Image (spheres, rainbow, N blue to C red):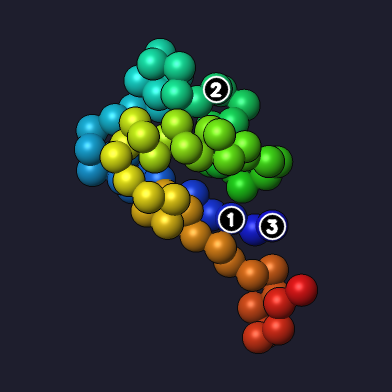
Amino acid sequence: MPFVYDKLFALMKEKGITKYQLRRDKVIGVSAMESMRTGTGHVDTRTLGYLCEYLQCQPGDMMEYIPENQGGETK
């Protein structure tokens, strides 16, 4: 599914939190962060939960669903 995590990176910038801090505090691993950054791979719901707790936010504050078919119909 095409999830985009641009909101996560904007939220992190707004709160002054770096990717290094997330890794250091064992919130998210390098591969999961890279998957989010590049929009490839799979992100576990447990990871999303850890991020929500750490950042004090809701999933919709971090990510957005963009249908692959922007023409109207979704699969």
Contact check, label 1 and label 2, Cβ < 8 Å:
no
Observer-nearest of 52 and 28: 52
| Residue type at numbered disc 1 | Phe
Outermost residue to the left: 15
Residue farthest right in this picture: 75
Quickly name the residue at label 3. Answer: 1
Q: Residue at x 62, y 37 (%)?
A: 44
Tag 2–tag 3 contact (CB < 8 Å): no
Task: Give the x, y percent position of residue 74.
Answer: 71, 77
Q: Please, what secondary structure does the residue beneath circle 3 have?
A: loop
Amino acid type, callout 3: Met
Residue identifier under label 1:
3
Residue of label 2: 29
Q: Is the residue marked by circle 2 packed among few (<14), some (14-19), or many (20+) residues within 10 Å? A: some
For marks 1 and 2, the one nearer the N-term is 1
CB under 8 Å between discs 3 and 1: yes
Using a 10 Å C-alpha cutoff, classify the residue at mark 1 as few (fewer than 14 neighbours), some (14 to 19) or many (20 or more): some
Q: Position of residue 62 (x, y in %)?
A: 42, 49
